[in-house]
Amino acid sequence: MTHPFHEDGSEAKGQADHGGWFDGPGDPAGTADAGSDWPSAAAGGPRTSSWPQPEPAPAWQQPAPAARLAEVPPQAHPAHPLPYAPTKVTTEKAPVPDPAPATPKKPGRDRYLDLLRSIALVRVVVYHLFGWAWLSVLFPSMGVMFALAGSLMARSLGRPALGVIRGRIRRLLPPLWAFSAVALSLLYIGGWNPGKDPDSGGLWGWLGIVDYIIPISGPAYPFEVAHPPGFLESSWAEQGIGPLWYLRAYLWFVIASPLLLWAFRKVPWATLLAPLALTAVVGTGLVTIPGRTGDTVTDFAVYGSCWVLGFAHHDGVLAKVPRYLAVSGAALVMAFGLWWASGHLTEEGWDLNEIPLAQAAWSLGFVVILLQYSPSWQQLPGRLARWDKPITLANNRAVTIYLWHNFLIMATFPLIDLLYSLPFMNDRLSSALDTTYMFWTFVLVWPLIAVAIVGVGWIEDLAAKRSPRLWPDGGKKKRKRH
């Protein structure tokens, strides 16, 4: 079908070339265009061309001349009547309304990524509580968290890199300082002297305190404290301070991100797979880097591919790979990770956290699948919507939850032990408590995490230059919108 107007408002070809109307079959005025070799329209007129003279229309088909001229638009040529009964028209172009622009989506958080981060945090708490090695296979939380952080970092690097790095460090350090003040106080009460530490000692021992302020390397701490506080066991430092490795790795990824992002956009596949190759060197014993420096390099290598994968997700590179190809390749990488783990099991069994190359391969493949199927949710759909507030809260207090959860797990033990002192506790109830001890630990740790969120979580707001909030689950904000 030929439309009278194109999308840009111009007249259709043919109409524009002929004054807006097509030539009719006869010439009622008895004239022809000057210079034409068409014959005269008068009946019986001499032929000036070999072309046949069209027969005039019967009189009963022709309206009265006056009526025809009155109905022909002034712009139309009177010698070219319409082939049908004309109606009175105007020659002005009808305004063509512009198509309504698509309503742009309001910028906001991707709730699918928020959901993944919340699951990762819960999995970390459960893993440190029960110690189930298979959880590292079921859901590799650290790989997921580094990939999500990498995606957000790529989005932020649309601004000047130095300002982005400074902002990320500013958000990280104040919550760390609050945690470090408590940890160092407990170490001091426990009798730890960094200068006499058997592992480092001297000047290097005191320099290890710097990592509690800026996590450049792993912080120094004793494996056992000789005189720990009464409610903590002697290995509390290993359990409570050990997870600070995540902040150290995160800091180095933030600092390296401008260079990594530039390299990824130049040679994406090489940049994505280079950390995996580095893990095969430093994470397998082929090359050994001693001390906390070796731990820093190994962690950077193990999770580097996940961080770069976040770049691929943000830039849309991952979405361009056919899904069947991405999933198939990811499955092969994951299969290699499990195969490698099967031959390098440790005392913890299938705990991939203790097998760097297996962790790197499994996490990379797992995150590829999660991000390949990544929907972009502005709101949580269906039944997930009922978890909107907890998910919002977990994302707004992710640093607080990660920093304090191990301390809070250890704090549940002396609290539950108080139940044995209750007057009505007999052998039967004590036996039941023994059987369900870890269950009650799991139940109690969440209220303690809530107390930590209220007590120190607002430091995250100050670090981000926001007004302090005690319970940022998004509830008040949504009520204001209504």
Image: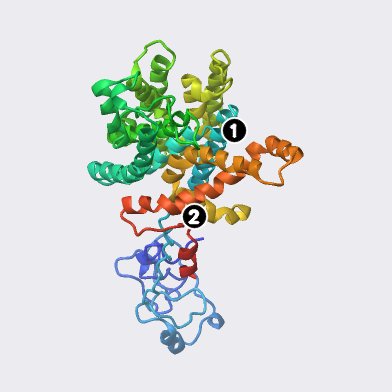
Specify the label residue 130 is tagged with. 1
Q: Which residue is mark 2?
A: 378
In the picture, measured across the screen, residue 448 lies left or right of residue 176, that is: right
Residue at 36%, 53% (x, y): give it. 461
Comparing labels 2 and 1, the label whose residue is closer to the camera:
1
Q: Residue furthest bottom?
A: 66
Q: Secondary structure at mark 2?
A: loop
Residue at 35%, 32% (x, y): give it. 248
Which residue is more in the foreground, 442 or 228?
Answer: 228
Residue 206 vertical placement versus 229 (above, below): above
Q: Amino acid at mark 1?
A: Phe
Coordinates of residue 207 in the picture (x, y in percent):
26, 27
Asked where in the image residue 166 lies, by quadrant, the reply is: top left
Q: Secondary structure at mark 1?
A: helix
Which residue is more in the foreground, 290 or 316?
Answer: 290
Q: Amino acid at mark 2?
A: Gln
Q: Is residue 380 visible?
A: no
